[in-house]
Amino acid sequence: MAEIIHPFYESHRGAMQAAMRHRLDLAEAMLSERAQLSNMDGIRQEVMAEFDIVLTQIPYVGGAASRMSDFFMRLLGFLAISRVLRRHGVPVSMIGEIERETYKAQLLTVPEGERLDSGRQFMSLENQSLLREQATKSATESHQKEFPEDFVYDFVEPGPNDSFEFGINYTACGFCKFAAHHEDKEILPNICGLDFVAYAARGIHLERTQTLAGGASHCNFRFSRSRD
């Protein structure tokens, strides 16, 4: 019996697969030179087949109504890459380096003005208000019962001596839950490392000193506008 992809993810399947193929194009030279992989056509086929499996595993957390749906769609594909490379004996640390550089290269194909506009929108007061609302909702019993695989988080206001503009404390992580269900804990930290790349590309400075994946009680994201 074929595994089923949730209709929300099925509607985005084409775009997600195209993004995966683009990542593999960008990663090809690194996979060949650093990971010493020679059969790139075979690697591509394995990764895309693994991605089809990941698509059946992605938890539904509310679709377009939840900001975390986009996180799952953009980043869980890297677990497909990690799984395949790990099976080929590539060290986890090297997998993480290749994925970060690949993701950065992919993000930088978007025009700078568009990326920075996205960053300004994320840092805007309007978006901060939305984040407060969704953070409150994520912690409710009804939401956690309906979407048990979702993230749970708190919005953090800066104190008088803080330099960040706002923060988010994730007290439950959808990626951690996913990794626990699918035996991906070893490669989970590679997903965490992509956050710095994603925000920097949009002109946002992220500070984070601990993660749930690393054994902490929460992930402490702190955001400010880049000064570069």
Image (tube, rainbow, N blue to C red):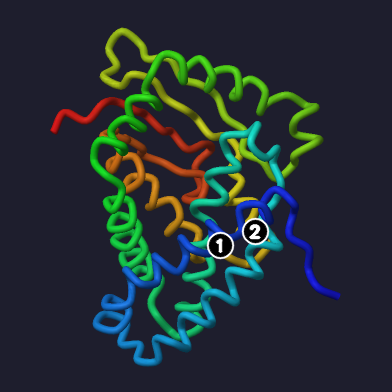
Q: Badge 2: few (under 14), some or many (20 or more) residues near its Cα, within 10 Å?
A: few
Q: In the image, what residue type sits under mark 2? A: Ala
Q: Badge 1: few (under 14), some or many (20 or more) residues near its Cα, within 10 Å?
A: some
SS class, disc 1: loop
Q: Give percent across and percent down for residue 85.
A: 45, 78
Comparing 180 with 15, the one in front is: 15
Comparing 114 with 225, the one in front is: 114
Query: Against 193, is 124 above or below?
Result: above
Comparing 217 with 142, the one in front is: 142
Query: Against 180, is 224 above or below?
Result: above
Measure the C-alpha gap from mark 2 to mark 1: 6 Å
Q: Give percent across and percent down for residue 65.
A: 65, 31
Disc 2 to disc 1: CB gap under 8 Å: yes
Report the disc number at residue 55: none
Upstream in the sequence, badge 2 or badge 1?
A: 2
Q: Give percent across and percent down for residue 49.
A: 60, 77
Residue lying at 24% horizontally and 83% vertically, measured from the top left? 33
Q: Is residue 3 left or right of residue 29?
A: right
Residue lying furthest bottom: 39
Query: Is the N terminus in the top left, top right, bottom left or bottom right quadrant?
Result: bottom right
Residue lying at 70% horizontally and 51% vertically, measured from the top left? 59
Question: Which of the 4 quarters of the picture holds residue 138?
Answer: top right
Q: Give percent across and percent down for residue 186.
A: 51, 66
Residue lying furthest right: 1
**Which residue matches tag 1?**
185
SS class, disc 2: helix
**Which residue matches tag 2?**
180
Comparing 53 with 85, the one in front is: 53
